[in-house]
Image: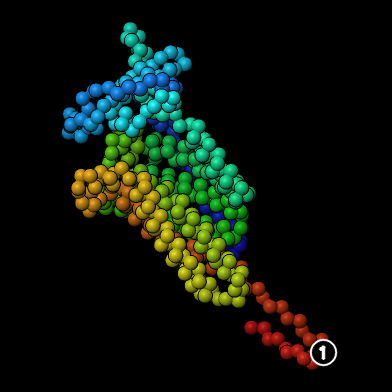
Amino acid sequence: MKVVSSIIVALVIVLTTIGVIALWPDSNAVPKDQNPYSGPGVSIIKATVTKSQPLECGSGGEGPDGITEVAGKCADVTATTSSGTARFTLDAARAKAGIEVGDKITVVKFAQQGQPTAYEFYDFQRGLPLTLLAIAFAILVVAVARWRGLFAMVGIAVTLLALTKFMLPAFLAGGNPLLVAVVGSTGIMLVVLYLAHGISIRTTSALFGTLAGLAITAVLGLGASGWSHLTGIGSEDDTLLAAVAPLANISGVVAAAMVVAGLGVLNDVTVTQASAVWELRAAKPDAGALEIFASAMRIGRDHIASSVYTLVFAYAGSAMTVLLLIVAYQRGLAEMATTEQIAQEVVRTLVGAIGLVLAVPITTAFAVMMAPPPPDIQFQPPLAGPQPGRRRATAN
């Protein structure tokens, strides 16, 4: 079994490498210089708020597009920059959210020739808190998981590298999104699984289950996105992306996103199932394959239930603003669920959940087949006939 699995893994590595080479995006086809704040005389600079005063700006009612505006006062903000003083008006929504003296922000500086320099609020500076949180996370992971935690951190770096250097540019350059997602996800799993969990037959069984789950998710995602008529244009960002990257297959990215989104939970489930089979085999070395499979599936069913909840809660947390708007508009959830923006997330969650559920028995079956068999009982032949007080052992 080790030889066969090694051959299969080697074949997967070769095919994935060929796929990456074939799908690698042409740098000339990837949109560049599309940042609206990178034009002549336009720059983003750091600043510190030194003064903030309420300003009556007539905010409220409905805007020209019929969307309700935030009622309240704007803010007249003064901030210091490396080149002088910046003054700008903050809209009512952001002013209501709060801006105080001493806040570190970034502003857009417009220094057009022949015109007075103007400033516009861009965002708060979040580099320090994000960096400290990332460092704390990395330290805790390594402290608790030790070498495996360190390798998991390396796996995160590999994942980000694969996304930013291969998958996302390939999407923008007009590559087949689903094929790129499957090839890229396979490559990520090959590196991440063996890095975090070591090179072993147990990790290989988890890899096989993960690849099966990826294939199922890809097929279901392609069918479900077409069946549900998901165009990929569900928000202003989607429309902007379609304009900035005309070669990108936006509707195909919807199915590709389903593959990438389900990768983490899928990996979690398959690794857990493989580990459960190995532990059960160690605890009951004489148990048959069906008994081990049944015991591991009892663990898997609990994991399925908790993972499905995880998918739903993850979406509810990320889409809290949309859900709040649904309640505020007093529109039924069933009605809103059919809109493009929410339907994408619903289909993504359901497809991911189906792939996850099916990956559990598949991974368990792989692990049972690949786990070490019960140890053979070695018998020593008698020297000269039956010995007193001993029974002759009969090999089964």
What residue lies at 46% left-to-right and 40% top-to-bottom?
A: 163
Q: Where is residue 30 in the image (x, y as percent from the top left)?
A: 41, 31
Q: Tell me the quarter of the image containing the C terminus.
A: bottom right
Q: Residue furthest top?
A: 114
Q: Which residue lies furthest to the right in this view?
A: 384
Element type at mark 1: loop
What residue lies at 50% left-to-right and 43% top-to-bottom?
A: 159
Q: Can you see residue 73? A: yes
Q: How is the image coloured?
A: rainbow
- Looking at the rendering, which quadrant does residue 382 occupy? bottom right
- Looking at the rendering, which quadrant does residue 36 occupy? top left
Left or right for 42, reference 92: right
- Looking at the rendering, which quadrant does residue 157 occupy? top right
Q: Position of residue 61 (x, y in %)?
A: 18, 31
Above-or-below relation of 84 to 188: above
Nearest the viewer among 62 and 149 is 62
Q: Where is residue 340 in the image (x, y as percent from the top left)?
A: 26, 45
Above-or-below relation of 372 to 145: below
Residue behind mark 1: 384
Q: Can you see residue 215? A: no
Above-or-below relation of 384 to 205: below
Q: Tell me the quarter of the image containing the N terminus.
A: bottom right
Amino acid at dot 1: Ala
Above-or-below relation of 113 to 70: above
What residue lies at 32% left-to-right and 28% top-to-bottom?
A: 95
Q: Position of residue 153 (x, y in %)?
A: 56, 44
Nearest the viewer among 372 and 312 is 312
What residue lies at 31% left-to-right and 42% top-to-bottom?
A: 321
Left or right for 98, reference 56: right
